[in-house]
Each structure stands twice: as structure tokens, then as C-alpha cells.
Amino acid sequence: MNSDQSFLGTGWSFPPSFDNISGTVQLVSEEIDISQSLEVLLSTRPGERVMQPAFGCNLDVMLFEPMTTTLIAYVKDLIQTAVLYFEPRIDMDTININTVNARDGLILIELQYTVLSTNSRYNLVYPYYLDEGTEADFTLNINLKKLLV
């Protein structure tokens, strides 16, 4: 659909990318814009945006906490509240938090939502990594071994 006629909105692509020839920003529209907007919302901590200090979803509460039913219910409420206030184009149907791989440092947040303007249902799986940068240590050790030989 033409971005000039988009009734669901048009915005910058995430991550931002630019056209090398014209120097313009790549734009996304419709459901792709909503999906990328949800990714930005889930990956932003409240207080990171200067002009919108309440924007975001504080998923960092899961760090260093045991995965209990209380914590999962709290995280679901954080997500539901953030979507309610900052993504008015959708209605949240269900939020599932998959903790099967939590020992490996991966929690999958599965969102099922309905786009209000078109009454179409979509889902988004947002991976939340508890352990970042584990591969960096491995490559660093390999490089150190090469230097010592």
C-alpha cells in the first residue's frame, strides 16, 4: 500500500536505515509499522526518551529474579499497560511468557493482538535475553589463545 494513503500509520523503519542514493529514511507502513513499534516499546526502558519519560516497558525487572508465577504475572501487566498507553492501534488478546529456555538465558514473550482498524489478528514473538555477550567471552578466549601460540 502507498505510504501516503496509510491509515494505520507510517514511520521510520527499525532499526533506522537510509537510502544511499537519495539520502532519505526508509519508511514502513501498516502492520509492519505496528510490529516494529511494539519491538521498540518492549526494548525501551521508561526514562530513556527525554521528551516521553513514561514511554517504554521495564522488562529489566526479570534480571536476577527467579522465574515465579508472581514475576510472570507482573511482567504481563507491565506489557499490557505499556501497550494500552502507547500503542492505541491494537487491542492485546493474549500475552504468553515462555520460560522453557530460561536456564539458557532466553525468555520468549509471545504477543497476540488485533489491529483495531482492520480487525486482523497478528502475533509477535519478542526474545528477551537474560545473558548478553556470552559469545564475546568465547571469541576473546580464542583470540588470546592465538596470540599466546
Image (cartoon, rainbow, N blue to C red):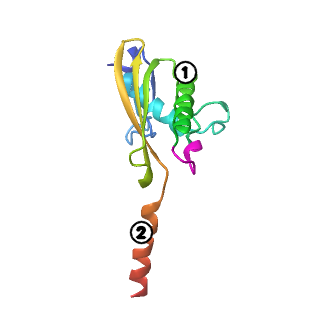
- Mark found first going from the N terminus, 1 or 2: 1
Please state if 37 lies on the left or on the right of 30 as rendered: right
Amino acid bearing label 1: Leu
Q: Nearer the viewer, residue 91 or 142?
A: 91
Circle 2 is placed at which residue position? 138
Above or below — where is 112 with respect to 59?
above
**Can you tell which quarter of the image residue 61 is in?**
top right
Residue 91 horizontal/vertical position (percent): 46, 17
Q: Main SS of the magenta segment?
A: loop
Q: Is residue 29 magenta?
A: no
Residue 5 horizontal/vertical position (percent): 39, 14
Range covered by the magenta-colored residues:
60-67
Q: Nearer the viewer, residue 51 or 86?
A: 86
Q: Quadrant of the N terminus?
A: top left
Q: Residue at x 42, y 69 (%)?
A: 138
For mark 1, give the secondary structure. Answer: helix
As measured in the structure, the alpha-carbon distance from the residue carrying label 1 to the one carrying label 2 is 41 Å
In this view, which residue lies farthest toward the left?
1
For mark 2, give the secondary structure. Answer: helix
Q: Residue at x 36, y 12 (%)?
A: 118
Residue 113 horizontal/vertical position (percent): 41, 22
Above or below — where is 11 with respect to 138?
above
**Can you tell which quarter of the image residue 149 is in?**
bottom left
Amino acid bearing label 2: Phe
